[in-house]
Amino acid sequence: GKSLTPEKIKALESIGFCWDQNQKNWYSMYERLKQYKAERKQQMGIISGGKSTKRSRGNNNADDNTDADIDVNATNNALFHIAPEDVANRDLRLWISVQRKEYSNYMQNKNNSSNNNGIKGGYSNTDTQKYTHTHAYSQKRTSMTPRRKRALDDIEFPWSLNNRQTYGNGDGPTVDDWTALFEQMRE
């Protein structure tokens, strides 16, 4: 017949048939991001709990982590930071940027719909037959879903980098980047 039977569907799935290429691509990049984070964690010497396994100079006592404590937020941002010079991960860097934009649209839609009870603003003026918007609100298209948001939340993805300070006019490295590089050079 012309329809897919449950047996045919199972057979296709058993050989890895993809029903939704966009979803497959998203989860493929998500897995790459998880791997990148794990590699960065290892490079930075981070163990669970936000402690560094690397000790500052002169501190040979493995139990004394006071000098090795790190700012969890700054570290989390650093774990997901891909430098522009990192050509091998340029696509992942772009994907991260897209996820932040999609999240912004998702949250804007969510906030707007709750503020307007799910009704788009506007009314029809019968005298002039013009449609006038009473709110500057419109739904933005987004590929972010609650499931994708949860997946990124589960790996502590930083949705915003607004808390990152930069030097001078914003050009060059952030304060966090400079500090991380300086710490690497000290070792």
Image (cartoon, rainbow, N blue to C red):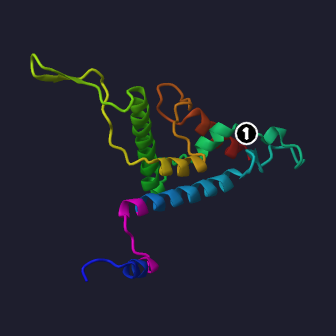
Does the magenta-highlighted stretch encompass residue 17?
yes
Q: Residue at x 65, y 42 (%)?
A: 75
The one nearer the camera, 160 or 152, is 152
The one nearer the camera, 100 or 58, is 100
Is residue 88 visible in the rendered image? The answer is: no
Q: Secondary structure at mark 1?
A: loop
The one nearer the camera, 116 or 52, is 116
Q: Which residue, given by chain and number where applicable, does mark 1 sit on?
A: 70
Q: Residue at x 40, y 82 (%)?
A: 7
Residue 97 position (above or below residue 41): above
Three-letter code, disc 1: Ile
Residue 23 position (above or below residue 62): below
Does the magenta-highlighted stretch encompass residue 109?
no
The one nearer the camera, 148 or 76, is 148
Picture coordinates of residue 109 (x, y %)? 39, 35
Residue bounds of the magenta highlight = 13-24
> Which residue extends farthest top?
127
Q: Residue at x 56, y 30 (%)?
A: 163
Picture coordinates of residue 29 (x, y %)? 47, 58
Residue 128 position (above or below residue 142): above
Q: Residue at x 24, y 23 (%)?
A: 133
Picture coordinates of residue 22 (x, y %)? 37, 59
The image quarter containing residue 164 is top right
Can you say which quadrant of the picture contains the N terminus? bottom left
Q: Is residue 160 left or right of residue 51?
A: left
Picture coordinates of residue 121 (x, y %)? 29, 26
Q: Is residue 147 left or right of residue 22?
A: right
